[in-house]
Image (cartoon, helix red, strand yellow):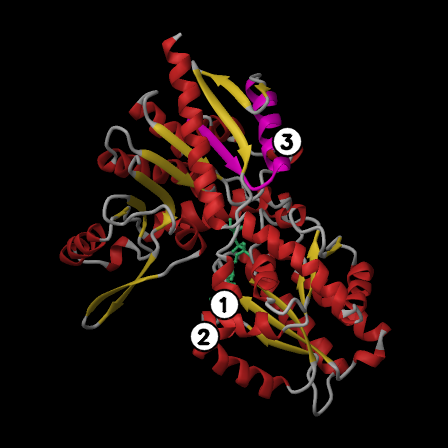
Amino acid sequence: MARLVVVANRLPVSVIKRKDGLRVSSSPGGLASGLSACFRPESDRWVGWPGIAAERLSMAERESLEGRLRRRGHCPVFLSQEEVERYYLGFSNRTLWPLAHYFPQYAVYDRSLWEAYRRVNQRFAETVVEVVEPGDTIWVHDYQLMLLPGMLRQRLGTDATIGFFLHIPFPSFEVFRTLPWRREMVEGLMGADLVGFHTYDDALHFLESVRRLTGASDNVGRITWEGRVVTVDAFPMGIDVDRYAGASQLPEVEEQLRRVRQQLGATRVVLSVDRLDYSKGIPQRLEAFELFLERHPQYRERVTMVMVAVPSRTEVPAYQALKREVDERISRINGRYGTLGWMPIRYLYRSLPFAALAALYHVADVALVTPLRDGMNLVCKEFVASKRDGRGVLILSEMAGAAKQLPEALLVNPHNVEQMAAALDEALSMSEDDQRARNRLMQQRLRQYDVDWWATTFLRRLEEARGVQRALAQK
Ligand code: GDG
């Protein structure tokens, strides 16, 4: 099997600087666990930023860190504080992220941020070129590196195998066209042999942008571009089902379960878990919960919402404003409906350890997952997979990529507060037979299309795309 070179904004490690030196620990985010079935640390390579600004490291520290990372198959791209601010917090998260999630009002078009994005993509290209060997498969991930496939193609030529996967939505052309550097972005992606998205809608949006911006149209997802063929397709990302289905058996999760039950008492639980991000629809969700309590007084003191909001991009102004809004809404609802013995919303503004999250998935009667836009959304899949006894109801936004795969959930429009309030009532009064029937179907599908399926299918399709390419070259 060809050697794999994964390229992502972050390496799957966290580096902490302490008085006695640098501490490097694995931090297996979604991508690292997703790739665990096909990433072999002995031979494969992972190129990314180690998560600490270059200025914070002395030359000696940098060299020693590089050595330690390379032994794990990790090839660091060192970024300065300014580069992180402009390329990551700036162009990636203040330009591309809002556009992709249909928040053009938050999108900042600033030439200096764009320049930084291009420069950092160039730096990634240099590291990949140093690391890559003939015959390797290069797999680039996500919106921070959309120019990289094109840069790599220029340097490595038509023989290189390059795949790209976008983890967030690709917006419709009417939104994408507002980006001053739209053509460069599309051409950057066209450097790949295979461009993958979570859903067909995203793939179609991309193909439409290619057609409108370059005139090149596709033939069933294949575009002929500069003498090569670029394949475009959908690969919905799945999860490691057993990790969630088996979690309640682990001693540390059992311990957490005891604590959660003790702390929440006999109340039924509506769970909300996401990064604190404006794409996740948190204010609308809170409004729906408030309306639900207003319209259905019988549930007061009997239902508690547990809201886990993981701090995210706290340096970006739109996230700071959202934090204030969420804090205010929660305190208003708790002030209005709370009693001495019951708080309607238990709010945790931090990231929980896996055992605590797994315990909440296990305990929750309802998961309220209502993003305004989401490439896929893994939280809803993790909740369903955790429900071993088949009880529990998922209320899911139709705007999440996952909605296409989970039609047995109660699907809602996340802007429709009345509909979400009614769905909460429906979920809390649904028969156990109905809950089990829906969860069984969803669990079967999650098993069939799990995260290993996602990674291996993408890589197989990339190999096929190369086959098409080779056949073309021989003609
Ligand atoms: C992007 C796209 C796409 C959350 N809170 C805690 C915690 N989590 C974990 C969840 C889940 C992950 O974080 C969140 O993944 P999502 O998919 O729901 O959302 P994004 O972070 O926005 O991810 C998204 C994804 O990429 C993959 O392609 O689905 O559309 O936006 O795995 O479990 N984990 C722990 N404590 C927490 O408090 N340990």
The residue beneath circle 1 is 246
Query: Residue at coordinates 52% horizontally, 47% vertically from top-left?
Result: 237
Query: CA gap, disc 2 to disc 3?
Result: 47 Å
Query: CA gap, disc 1 to disc 2?
Result: 7 Å
**Mark 2 belongs to which amino acid?**
Leu
**Mark 1 belongs to which amino acid?**
Gly
Query: What is the x, y in percent for residue 172?
Result: 65, 35
Q: Residue furthest top?
A: 475
| CB-based contact (under 8 Å), mark 3 and mark 1 | no
- Is 198 positioned to the left or the right of 161 in the image? right
Location of residue 218 with respect to 8 vertically, above or below: above
Query: Residue at coordinates 64% horizontally, 36% vertically from top-left?
Result: 201
Question: For the C terminus, which image quadrant?
Answer: top left
Q: Which mark is residue 173?
A: 3
- Is 272 positioned to the left or the right of 141 in the image? right
Location of residue 45 with respect to 357 vertically, above or below: above
One can see residue 177 in this view: no
| CB-based contact (under 8 Å), mark 1 and mark 2 | yes
The residue beneath circle 2 is 250
